[in-house]
Image (cartoon, grey):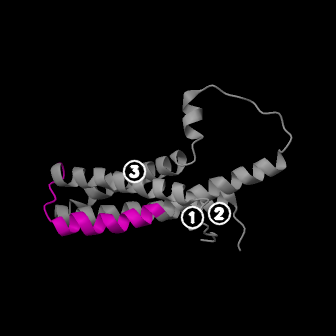
Amino acid sequence: MPLKIRWLKREYSGIALMLFGLCAIFQACYIFIAQYFLSIGNYIVIIVIPVGVIFALFYCSIIIFESFAQVQRSRKITRRFAKRITEKARLRKALQFPVVRPILIIIAIFSVFFFPSYFISIIWFNNLYSFIIAEFMGAIACIFVANIIERHYAKIQRY
């Protein structure tokens, strides 16, 4: 993935912390679901696997955020003197916040791949292995979708 990482500078450090926190809260919800609804009792699997998935989702959200930011920068350059249209729709205004779109994409893709892969793999394995498989399938799907968004939507130039 040809991403120029500028996340250690002061420009994006706040957004990076917000993205990491939201990914951690999202995985905390899945830990809650795994413990109480899917009856996963092994605490090592409940802690170690989601921590790795948090970092994978964080990396995906950074890639998606950078893709949207680059498209926004290029539009700003090409439409410098265009007339601005103000919209009053609350949903559109909420989606303008830079952290919302990457997190919504991550949540949707991860959920779409987590639950079907868990319920399909529960047929052949026990619930512990099914949870591990479902977490990995969701994380891998998010990485692939982030790569697709980066290559086809943003068309990021290689540095």
Q: Which circle marks residue 147 in the picture?
A: 1
Q: Dot 3, crowdedness within 10 Å: few (<14), some or many (≥20)?
A: few
| Rendered position, 8 above or below 22 | below
Element marked by disc 2: helix
Give me the C-alpha separation between circle 2 and circle 1. Answer: 6 Å
Give me the C-alpha separation between circle 3 and circle 1. Answer: 17 Å
Element marked by disc 1: helix
Residue 69 coordinates in the image, percent (x, y): 65, 54
Element marked by disc 3: helix
Answer yes or no: do the residues labelled 2 and 1 have beta carbons within 8 Å? Answer: yes
Residue picked out by circle 3: 112
Residue picked out by circle 2: 151
Residue drawn 65% across and 63% down? 151
Q: Which of pointers 3 and 2 lies earlier in the amino acid sequence?
A: 3
Name the residue at the top extreme. Answer: 88
Give the extent of the magenta segment: 37-58
| Rendered position, 60 above or below 77 | below
**Closer to the eye: label 3 or 1:** 1
